[in-house]
Amino acid sequence: MTRYGMLIDTTTCVGCYECENACAIKWGNPTSDVPKLSASRNTAVATVNDVNVPHLCMHCADPTCASVCPVGAFSKTPEGPVVYNADKCIGCRYCMQACPFDIPKYEWSSTNPKVAKCNLCSERITRGQKPACVEVCPAEARIFGTIDDLILLAQKKIQDNPVQYINHIYGVKEAGGTSVLFLSGRSFEEIGLKAGLPDHPLPTLTWQVLSHIPNYVFWGSTMLAGIWWITNRRKEVAAYERALRKLDRRSPNNGSQHSN
Ligand code: SF4
Ligand code: SF4
Ligand code: SF4
């Protein structure tokens, strides 16, 4: 199966935010001036040391979010995107703790909270389209393609312009490899990307660490049960409130029905 991904060239990004807007429209989210990922923002362009740096889920080859999720709410599709299934999520937020890139965000203000992150426009890729943010980028700072083609393109860019780029493609090795790759003219740390990540996938490490903590299973399962109860209680309360509102609208004593 062909694996797809995105190459982000931070040296050509002009900071127009068209990508952010296209992503917000796709998800039905409001636009915002805060240059940070949030529950209603799956991509954000931050300006760090005068460099425009788009952020989004890295779509890891071996995603830690998927490996720690106790109910399988995250999965890696054969085409490359790491997708999230809100119907399965119990709100434990292990994914947020485990992600080496600090990507998943939580809908803290919702009565039925879920996790939010980019899905690499998985549904568009399946239809043979580019991700929405790539399609609108006027500067080819976001490029869509197969991982192999993107790596070849990035290598060629570095070879052709050794002054413009540092000789490193971020994401080829970081955390075992990702489907989102970055090029930069400055060190990746200087432009705000995580430095010092190991070359191997972190799921192995996560499970190795967790399996050596004897109380983890006990406390982990106790906490999960508590979180599951709270999450479901919130759902019940929300459903109850919805039913009450419906009843209220139908009630003959409701003032709005007698206003004519
Ligand atoms: S960057 Fe984080 S949320 Fe995205 S696939 Fe990797 S581990 Fe999962
Ligand atoms: S790939 Fe799709 S979901 Fe991800 S940042 Fe771009 S537009 Fe948003
Ligand atoms: S649309 Fe392209 S050039 Fe504009 S901010 Fe996004 S990545 Fe940068």
Image: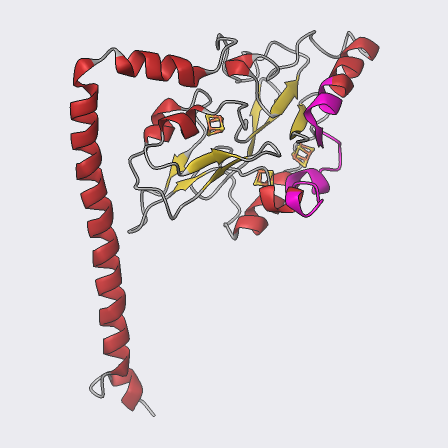
Name the spot of residue 245 as percent of width and height, x first: 26, 71
Name the spot of residue 176 as percent of width and height, x first: 53, 15
Query: What residue sits 50% from the left and 22% below the top?
Result: 62
Name the spot of residue 51 as percent of width and height, x first: 63, 21
Query: What residue sits 53% from the left and 17% below the top?
Result: 193
Say which of 151 and 244 sits in front.
Answer: 151
Say which of 142 and 5 sits in front.
Answer: 5
Query: What residue sits 62% from the left and 20% below the top?
Result: 50
Name the spot of residue 90 as percent of width and height, x first: 30, 41
Above or below residue 116? Residue 51 is above
Q: Which residues are magenta?
A: 126-151
Q: Quadrant of the N terminus?
A: top right
Q: Is residue 12 left or right of residue 236?
A: right
The magenta stretch spans residue 128 = yes
Above or below residue 195? Residue 55 is below
Above or below residue 30? Residue 223 is above
Above or below residue 28? Residue 214 is above
Q: Quadrant of ligand 3?
A: top right
Residue 52 appears in the picture as rendered? no
Q: Is residue 156 left or right of residue 122?
A: right
